[in-house]
Image (tube, coloured by chain):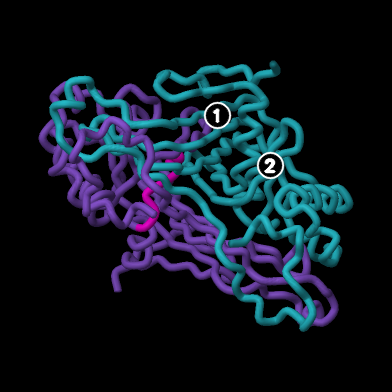
Chain colours: A cyan, B purple
Amino acid sequence: MTSYQPTKRSKAKRVHDRVAYDHEAVHEVFDALPMCHVGYAIDGQPYVTPTIQWRQGTRLYWHGSAASRMIKTVSAGAAVCVTVSQLNGFVMARSPFHHSVNYTSAMAFGHGAAITDAAEKEETLRHMFEHLFPGRWDDVRGNTAKELKATGVVFMEIEEASAKTRGGPPIDDEEDYDGVDCWNGVLTVGPAYGAPVNVERNKPGIGFPDYLKHMRS
Amino acid sequence: MTSYQPTKRSKAKRVHDRVAYDHEAVHEVFDALPMCHVGYAIDGQPYVTPTIQWRQGTRLYWHGSAASRMIKTVSAGAAVCVTVSQLNGFVMARSPFHHSVNYTSAMAFGHGAAITDAAEKEETLRHMFEHLFPGRWDDVRGNTAKELKATGVVFMEIEEASAKTRGGPPIDDEEDYDGVDCWNGVLTVGPAYGAPVNVERNKPGIGFPDYLKHMRS
C-alpha cells in the first residue's frame, strides 16, 4: 500500500477519529468532494478560499481568474494547504462533551505551481470536466485563446496528506446511558441533487442529457 | 446599515458575483452554515481545519480539543481567516469558460483569543447548543470540570468580513445561445437531512424530541 508519509504537519495527535495516510483512502476523499478550501498565507496573513479541485495522480488541481490573488499567490509557489470536508451528521449524545459530528475530510500539503502552456491548460480543464461531468466536454465548444489567457490553472504536488473521518453512533460515558434520559442518535445530513433549474433558454428539442442523469432529482 | 470595512484583505476585485460587507448579510451566512474552515499559519505554513463555528454579535466562536494544534495556535492570538461555503449548484453553460457554481460563502478575518474561565466556557458552549439545536441543552447533563478543562473554546472578533454568492442561470456569450446545441441550466445540490440513525441505545419510551424535528427527514 502506497502512503503519504506524515510529518508533524499531518500526523494525527488523537485517535478517536479514523485517520488514514494511504493514497487510496486520501484520493477517494478528494475525488468524492470537489468543493475544497485552499489555504495560503501572505506576509503571515492566512486566507482560505473556497473553490473546486480535481485530482490527477498525486496532484490536486484547481483554477480561477488569472487576476485573482489566490491564483497569483499559488502560481508563485506558495506553501498551500488544501482541505475538503463534508458534514454527514450531527451526533447527539447524552452529554455536551460527547456531542460530535460525523464527517469525511482530507487535508493535503504542498507548494503551488501554475500551468502556463495554453494547450496544456486546455487539456487540464478537459480533465476537470471528465472528472466532474463525464461526457460534458464533447457537448460544449472549446476555450478561445482569450478565455484560456484569463483562466489561471494551478496545481499542487501532494507532499503529505491525510484523510480523517468520523462515523457511527454517539459514544457516551457508560453511566450516562442509564443516567441521562434524552433522545440520542445521529441526525444525518448530506448533499442531495435537486431538480435542474434556470433552463429557460434551452432550444426546443434539446433535452436533458444522459450523462448528467446522476446529478438530478 | 452597519458594515465591515473592507481593506485589500477582503475587498472584492471582480464584480460578477454578489459581494456584501454589511453585518446583516455577513452574519446571515455564518449563521446558516455552521461548518467552517479555519485558516492559520505557523512559520509560514498554512493550515485549514474544518470545524463548527457559531456567532455571538461580531465574534465567531469555535471549539476543539484543548490539546490540538489549531486550538493552541488560535488561543495564542494568531491571525485567522474563517471561511464558510455551501455549493448550491453546478452552472452548466455552453462553453467551459462560463461553467460555474452557484454558492453561498463568507470569509472573515481577525485574531484568535481563548476563553479560559470555566463558567464562561460553559455559558459559551450553551450558546453553541442554543444556536445549533435550540432546546437540546436542557435535555443533556452539564459539563464536568474535567470535560471543560479538556475543551478549548476560542473566538475571533471579526475585523473585516465579506459575504459572496452566485445564483441564477448560466450567462453565456450571446452568440453561443444559438451556436452551441447542448443542454444548459443549473444542477441544484444542497444539504438535506435524512432519517436519524444509530438510535439503538435509546431507552424504551424515549421518543424523538420536538426540538429536533426540523433536522430529520
Q: Is residue B117 visible?
A: no
Q: Quadrant of residue B182?
A: bottom right
Could you say where residue B168 lies in the image, as x and y percent from the top left? 57, 73
Between A58 and B44, the residue placed more toward the observer is: A58
Residue sitting at the far front: B204
Q: Which mark is residue A20?
A: none
Between A171 and A77, the residue placed more toward the observer is: A171
Label 1 – label 2 distance at C-alpha: 27 Å
Could you say where residue B185 lies in the image, as x and y percent from the top left? 66, 71
Q: Is residue B204 above or below residue A72?
A: above
Q: Is residue B75 above or below residue A203?
A: above
Between B39 and A88, the residue placed more toward the observer is: A88
Q: Which mark is residue A76?
A: 2
In this rendering, which labeled residue sits more in front, label 1 or label 2? Answer: 1
Q: Is residue B39 above or below residue B15?
A: above
Is A91 on the left or on the right of A177, as rendered?
right
Could you say where residue B175 lies in the image, as x and y percent from the top left? 81, 81
Q: Is residue B32 above or below residue B170?
A: above
Q: Which residues make up the magenta segment?
A: B32-39
Q: Which residue is mark 1?
A: A163
Q: Is residue A199 visible?
A: yes
Magenta residue check for B35:
yes
Name the main secondary structure of what is drawn in magenta: strand
Instruction: Indicate the secondary structure of the residue bearing disc 1.
Output: strand
Q: Give the residue displayed 72% in from the left and 75% down from the top.
A: B172
Amino acid type at circle 2 is Ala
Amino acid type at circle 1 is Ala
Rate crowding at label 2 as few (under 14), some (14 to 19) or many (20 or more) other CA atoms within 10 Å: some
Instruction: Indicate the secondary structure of the residue bearing disc 2.
Output: loop
Q: Give the residue displayed 39% in from the left and 60% down from the top.
A: B29
